[in-house]
């Protein structure tokens, strides 16, 4: 669902525009001035911004200059009750998509928003294509490690990759499930075609079917043009369904049908489209437990889990930590354009003892932190200061949370402690 930000100091104007846009099924946020707008766009991604010119603190003309720096691809529609031709020309020169006088003509406003969204979609498609082109000559990142579990995964990839067997990759967040999926694609006859990724957890349940299967123009309120779904985009390639455990039951039923029949139907359409797709799915959930709870279809599970691959958490493969650290140091120093830093063996041993709840992703972040904050060599003292102490604090907080039955009792405790600290209570 498209998201629009209304920026106007007049509450009445904001309320009116909100009602109109929500009636048209848009998601709407509000900002009271230019500064508030900048805060909002740092926190969220918007498809269109509607901005007044005359506002306190920071007016629209100054704000649009900042928007062009922070989010240059977001179309900005300027509105003003004091506008003239010169104002409109200046606004467009500063990057505005269009200029509309107050009170805005409703039909013109909606058409302008629709055109601005079309521009946003074209920019997104261009960026996606550029990423695909840049990845064509780029090698898939190596799976680092020689532990028994990682060696078994590499062996499975070599055996299964050349087939069309569906694979279910399981494991905790940050453990490298996506990398396994990419290597399965790289080892398959489909490697010269696309691998298309869908994060099922990041897409609202009401939009997942449109995302997967596409939709016909006019099939619902905001379907202004035909959309090709991920199944079609992955034709003759690989479709990676990440976090499939978060997919709604209705979408699961349609995915099951697509896998059974190798055919899909776009939302709002009646024509069946033949697709040739290899599906690799991933989840951090226990799908067998989700089946017992009624949250996941057992028949879909068996369709997906022809070959199950379990990716272990970093705590279960601590022997791989030294080679992962060396790999990250080389890569990160190269990214920053700095000489490759050394790391003390005792520092590595201390890192092997850390409780890695965030797995590979957390380890990489920690290595980057150490590279930035340490001297020429990463020492045991650096690890103690920048990693171990933070890890200890995290466990202390975890123990604190366990003492309370609910969030309200924890909040009450924290309020009292804060008041003691500030000297309000004695």
Image (cartoon, rainbow, N blue to C red):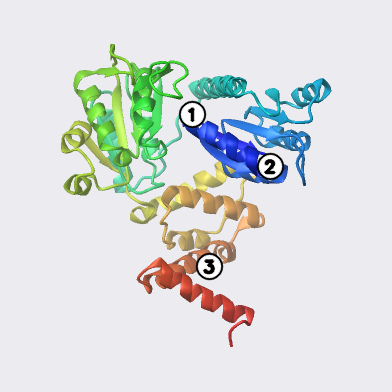
Asked whether, in this view, residue 390 is left or right of residue 185, the answer is right
**181, 32: nearer the viewer:** 32
Residue drawn where x is 58% and y is 78% of the image: 419
Tell me which label, 3 or 2, sits earlier in the chain.
2
The total of numbered circles placed on residues is 3
- Between disc 3 and disc 1, the foreground one is 1
Residue drawn where x is 53% and y is 25% of the image: 131
- Residue at mark 3 to residue at mark 1: CA–CA distance: 51 Å
Provide residue 376's location: percent of width, then percent of height: 66, 54
- Residue at mark 3 to residue at mark 2: CA–CA distance: 49 Å
Crowdedness near tag 3: few (<14), some (14–19) or many (≥20) residues, C-alpha within 10 Å: few
- Vertical comparison of 166 with 362: above or below: above
Crowdedness near tag 1: few (<14), some (14–19) or many (≥20) residues, C-alpha within 10 Å: few
- Residue at mark 1 to residue at mark 2: CA–CA distance: 22 Å
- For label 2, the residue is 10
Asked whether, in this view, residue 249 is left or right of residue 227, the answer is left
- For label 1, the residue is 24
Secondary structure at badge 3 equals helix
Provide residue 382's location: percent of width, then percent of height: 59, 62
Tell me which label, 3 or 1, sits earlier in the chain.
1
Provide residue 375's location: percent of width, then percent of height: 67, 57
Provide residue 209's location: percent of width, then percent of height: 34, 28
**79, 343: nearer the viewer:** 79
The answer to whether the residues at label 1 and label 2 have Cβ atoms under 8 Å apart is no
The answer to whether the residues at label 3 and label 2 have Cβ atoms under 8 Å apart is no
Q: Which mark is residue 389?
A: 3
Secondary structure at badge 2 equals loop
**410, 15: nearer the viewer:** 15
């Amino acid at each position: 669902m498209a998201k629009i930000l209304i920026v106007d100091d007049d509450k009445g104007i904001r309320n009116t525009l909100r009602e109109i846009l929500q009636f048209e099924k848009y998601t709407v946020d509000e900002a009271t001035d230019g500064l508030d707008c900048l805060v909002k766009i740092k926190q969220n991604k918007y498809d269109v911004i509607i901005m007044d010119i005359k506002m306190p603190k920071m007016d629209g003309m100054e704000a649009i200059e900042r928007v062009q720096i922070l989010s240059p691809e977001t179309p900005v529609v300027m509105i003003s009750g004091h506008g003239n031709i010169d104002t409109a020309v200046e606004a467009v020169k500063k990057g505005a998509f269009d200029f509309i006088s107050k009170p805005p003509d409703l039909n013109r406003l909606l058409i302008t928003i629709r055109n601005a969204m079309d521009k946003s979609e074209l920019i997104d498609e261009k960026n996606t294509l550029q990423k695909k082109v840049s990845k064509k000559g780029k090698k898939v990142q190596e799976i680092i490690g020689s532990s028994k579990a990682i060696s078994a995964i590499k062996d499975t990839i070599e055996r299964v990759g050349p087939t069309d067997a569906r694979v279910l990759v399981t494991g905790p967040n940050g453990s490298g499930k996506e990398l396994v999926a990419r290597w399965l694609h790289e080892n398959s006859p489909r490697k010269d075609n696309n691998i298309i990724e869908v994060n099922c957890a990041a897409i609202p349940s009401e939009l997942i079917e449109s995302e997967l299967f596409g939709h016909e123009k006019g099939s619902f309120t905001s379907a202004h043009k035909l959309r090709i779904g991920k199944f079609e985009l992955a034709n003759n390639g690989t479709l990676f369904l990440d976090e499939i455990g978060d997919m709604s039951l209705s979408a699961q039923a349609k995915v099951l049908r697509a896998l059974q029949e190798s055919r899909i139907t776009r939302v709002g359409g009646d024509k069946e489209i033949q697709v040739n797709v290899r599906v690799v799915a991933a989840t951090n959930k226990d799908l067998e437990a989700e089946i017992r709870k009624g949250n996941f279809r057992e028949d879909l599970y068996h369709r997906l889990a022809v070959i199950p691959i379990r990716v272990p958490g970093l705590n279960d493969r601590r022997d791989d930590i030294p080679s992962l650290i060396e790999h990250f140091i080389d890569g990160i120093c190269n990214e920053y354009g700095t000489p490759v830093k050394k790391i003390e063996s005792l520092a590595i041993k201390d890192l092997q003892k850390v409780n890695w709840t965030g797995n590979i992703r957390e380890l990489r972040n920690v290595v980057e932190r150490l590279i930035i904050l340490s001297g020429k060599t990463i020492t045991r003292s650096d690890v103690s200061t920048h990693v171990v102490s933070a890890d200890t604090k995290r466990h202390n907080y975890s123990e604190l949370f366990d003492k309370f039955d609910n969030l309200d009792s924890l909040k009450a405790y924290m309020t009292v402690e804060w008041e003691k600290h500030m000297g309000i209570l004695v």
